[in-house]
Image (cartoon, grey):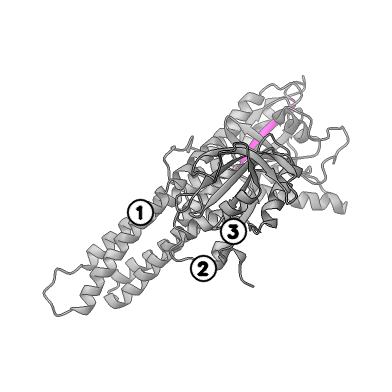
Amino acid sequence: MLDPRLSKDTIAAIATPPGDGGVGIVRVSGSRAREIVRAMFRPARETFTDFRPYRLHYGHVTDADGTVLDDALCAFMPGPNSYTGEDVVEINCHGGRAVLGAVLQETLDHGARLAERGEFTYRAFMNGRMDLSQAEAVAEMIHAPTKAAMHLAQVKLSGLLGQKITELRSRLEALRAQLAVAVDFPEEELECLSPEQLIGTVEGVRGEIGSLLKAVDRTRAWREGALVVLAGRVNAGKSSLMNALLGRNRAIVTDQPGTTRDYLEETLNLDGLTVRLADTAGIRATEDAIEAAGLEMGRELMDRADLVLLLADGTAPVDADTLDAARRIGPEKALAVLNKADLDTFDAQNGETLKAVGLETASVSAKSGDGLDRLSARIRERVLGNAGQPDPDELAPNARQAAVLAEADRELAALAGDTAAGIPYDLLSVRLETACDVLSGITGEIAANDILNSIFDSFCIGK
């Protein structure tokens, strides 16, 4: 079946988030955009003849019977200097669902087609208004969980990542040209590229690819948020600690063990860093199938976590199950938390066995709040490591782009190895061509339809 995004239809969609709001926008793009909106727009001024570019025109949107649907401000942006590169009209009206639905339906009744997911940005990409890295940055801007993530997306939206990839490809393309000379004119006395020079240039490009890949890991917590898992024996205070960190009662807290059978997840903001806080089922032997499934989910979460808060009751010696969990998780990922510091029977020495297996420990009282600020600060430091706040101008590829860069790096590493082994230049040029083609997948010069579909299908319908 032909992808509707490949058509030249005039498309329309609600461009603002679902729900009720003060203002909503219906966006129309395509060759008939101005004609369609003009047919349903009743201007407030009698002198109005047609939409003027880049001006807001006040009036009313009406249905086919002339019944007023809503007050509206309409803006016309002619192509190619619009978001999509086509004629675009945006209808600004009240943000109620019924109002927006009625206005959108009217555009469809006049000949527009409902836009597919990401189709406005897809058209911007296809019409040369942005490269593929910029198109992906649009979605990253929309979904940015932190201000830092927003800035990182803005850098890519400005085109800097695309420019960097283009520059790296240009250096590799220059190598291809030099290899072609060496292959086509072997008998000529030409200043040809030596194997050492070839390897040096390739390694230089690999070094810059490596820097981009390091930025992926360094900024991941800012771009995606960090997963912090609460683990420990039943009644160690995991749910109480979750509630205390959130500042509200989210998890059920009782004296009965095994209250949490599944896992709970909530979002916490730690000084600008978004943390996904997950409260898991208490560690213990059980024959209850539901609780056992919850324990297995907890183990899977711990494996994926950026940090595990391993809770222990500070009023008693650490039990064997908690020590086993500490050894399994390891000191790099685990932070031991001794709870119940408000009780007279609390003894920080109970944490020595956890320190003995390499874990950092912290003492808190989930009930009184003592030590929570210190713990929150330490969670943030542990998640970020030495990365800290990202540079506002840092180029940080997303997961797809990182996979492409890693593939190109593997091809270039093999090229350097083949060069050192004395492989003929005509064979080396094949690897060089492959590396160039792989890199072009980031900017979109060469991109399969299934890749494009997977990218734009992740967008909302109105973008």
User: Is residue 51 left or right of 351 when viewed as pictured?
Assistant: left
Give the percent coordinates (x, y) of residue 34. 56, 51
Badge 1: few (under 14), some or many (20 or more) residues near its Cα, within 10 Å? few
Q: Which residue is mark 3?
A: 10
Give the percent coordinates (x, y) of residue 442. 45, 58
The quadrant in which the N terminus is found is bottom right
Amino acid type, label 3? Thr
Measuring 37% from the left and 52% from the top, which residue is drawn there?
Answer: 164
Q: Specify which label sits upstream in the sequence, 2 or 3.
A: 3
In this rendering, the answer to whether 262 lies above or below 122 is above
Question: In the image as oriented, which residue stretches furthest toward the front?
Answer: 46
In the picture, residue 433 is in which quadrant? bottom left
* Numbered badge on residue 113: none
Q: Specify which label sits upstream in the sequence, 1 or 2.
A: 1
Tell me the CA gap for discs 2 and 3: 24 Å
Measuring 43% from the left and 63% from the top, which residue is drawn there?
Answer: 445
What is the secondary structure assignment of the residue under circle 3? Answer: loop
* Numbered badge on residue 448: 2
Amino acid type, label 2? Ala
191 magenta-colored = no
Question: In the image as oriented, which residue stretches furthest toward the left?
Answer: 189
Q: Which residue is mark 1?
A: 207
Q: Nearer the viewer, residue 296 or 78?
A: 78
Res 307 visible: no
Give the residues drawn in magenta, as a range: 332-340
- Between marks 2 and 3 in the image, the one whose residue lies nearer the viewer: 3
